[in-house]
Image: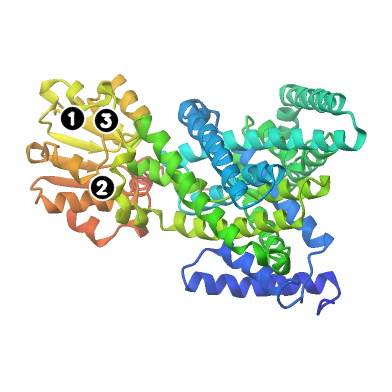
Amino acid sequence: MPLIDDVFSQTGLVLFIASVMGILAIKLKQPLIVGFIAVGIFLGPSVLGWVEANDQIDLLAKLGITLLLFIVGLKLDLHIIKTMGLVALATGIGQVLFTSVVGYFIAVALDFNHLESVYIAVALTFSSTIIIVKLLSDKREVDSLHGRIAVGFLIVQDIMVIVAMIGLNAISGAEISGKIGPNVIHVLISGGLFLLVVGLLMRFVLSPLLLFLAQSRELLLIFSIAWAVSLGALGHHLGFSKEVGAFVAGVSLASTPFRDVIGAKLVGLRDFLLLFFFVDLGAALNLAVIGDQVFAALLLSLFVLVGNPVIVMIIMGLMGYRKRTGFLAGLTVAQISEFSLILAALGVSLGHVDESVLGLVTLVGLITISASTYMILYSHRLYELLAPRLKLFERSINSELNMDALEDETRNPDIIVFGLGKFGRSIAQSFKASGYSVLGFDFDPERVKRANSEGIPAAYGDAEDSEFFETLPISHARWVVGAVHDRYATEALSRQLLGVAFSGCAAFSMKDESEVSDVIKEAGIVFIPYNYAAEHAAQVLLAQQKPLQQT
């Protein structure tokens, strides 16, 4: 029996303990996700038994997942899919195939039967969009190269897991009715009609409706939540899942001008509701059932934590990406997904596997989610430790992106720009227009190609790579500009410049003053583009000031 019987008091206790654990986690500089899962284990039936997973808490957890998938769909950037399509497909599909095949043989070696091994292998395959998107957002790395690649192959995985869940739900219905073919056809027809109706609503209804609703921010927010939950419920009843429906709901509003406003309004509510998802995950852990699965869970967790990042690094290295980008992107697949638990639970309900498999997958989920959270939070420090051993994961870059492909007059430039985003390219264009020779570098092949197409001599390179840095004509340059907007990359560039005693002028562009460290200040001057833009805008406005009319 739980210590507290009424749901309201249970919820209050969960929130209070979660707040205390959150404060402790921040003080210890630990991730909140792990703390929230620990709250569920601590208060749940397996330890104190003060709180039981109930329908109300489960409902809040499901609403949190629904809103998260809605926001993921809402912020679906088709440009990312287009520009990262090849690497996203290659890494997403490659990692899924590698993990499922090797995972199957590991499970067989652990004395699971073939069907159980298939379920375990597939459960190990998918990574958690919930956790990765949240961690990348917290670290402000969603827009970085490795962040965009990670989001790209997470989208590929989401599509694959959605297809898998649709198939499993179809098979589930077929198991009951005994008609596999008709049931699968029914799901496919229902899915097609579902997408068709949503597409028609996008074309003729949603844009004018949102324009009307935008007159009231409260009403716009309420409608957005209602739309996400309603399509989630509809997707569930049509044989897919609430996650699929919520994702489609988000995609349906992604092309409207209100997507950013809606997303910003829902972030706080999403984070609040996701608290219950992580607590519910911990509370559902049955320590008695999984006690005999510890060795298997540790072995499979080690495979996920090491094997998944390695295969991503291999694929990205073969495609010409630098070891740093491959490593940081690879860490994002070092855990299993919440969908893995759903898959295992479905296997139990179908009678394909028993509770020991569900307990094993749950334990692997907790281990990998906890460990990978730390790995991602401290990814740059891990890279610094492992960088010398990661050289084998990259190959020679394409000749069109190499310095050898540049004209001779660009070999000894007046200014070298690291980072060819909008700010870096603008700096390079301004210097070039003033008659100076320019040379740009970036570890994003697409940015290098774009810079060259705009007439900026550019090559593929990473300033954090000391061997690469030694080949650059730094001694001939009068200016060096770091426009990568990343603290760790900028610190590495700063140390490189200090190490060679660069005598010219160095400048670094940073997103926020809080990220400017002492080594960056020592190496050169710092620009905060947003601050400078605001100051310039204020000066323009002041110059246009007109005397107030007397009334």
Comparing 360 with 388, the one in front is 360
Kind of element beneath mark 1? strand
Q: Name which residue lies at 22% across and 59% down.
A: 519
- Residue 61, quarter of picture: bottom right
Above-or-below relation of 5 to 215: below
The image position of residue 185, as x and y in percent, is: 82, 23
- Residues at circles 2 and 3 in contact by the CB criterion of under 8 Å: no
Q: Name which residue lies at 92% across and 34% down.
A: 177
Looking at the image, tell me whether mark 2 or mark 1 is earlier in sequence order.
1
Image quarter in which the N terminus is found: bottom right
The Cα atoms of the two marked residues, 1 and 3, are separated by 24 Å
- Residues at circles 2 and 1 in contact by the CB criterion of under 8 Å: no
Above-or-below relation of 2 to 35: below
Q: Disc 1 or disc 3, which is closer to the eye? A: 3
314 lies left or right of 150: left
Q: Disc 2 or disc 3, which is closer to the eye? A: 3
Kind of element beneath mark 3? loop
Crowding near the residue tagged with mark 2, few <14, some 14–19, many ≥20 C-alpha atoms within 10 Å? many
The Cα atoms of the two marked residues, 2 and 3, are separated by 28 Å
Amino acid type at image mark 1: Val
Q: Name which residue lies at 65% across and 70% down.
A: 39
Residue 165 visible here:
yes
- Residue 10, quarter of picture: bottom right
Mark 3 sits on what residue? 396
The image position of residue 33, as x and y in percent, is: 58, 61
Mark 1 sits on what residue? 438
Mark 2 sits on what residue? 508
Above-or-below relation of 347 to 45: above
Q: Name which residue lies at 89% across and 28% down.
A: 179
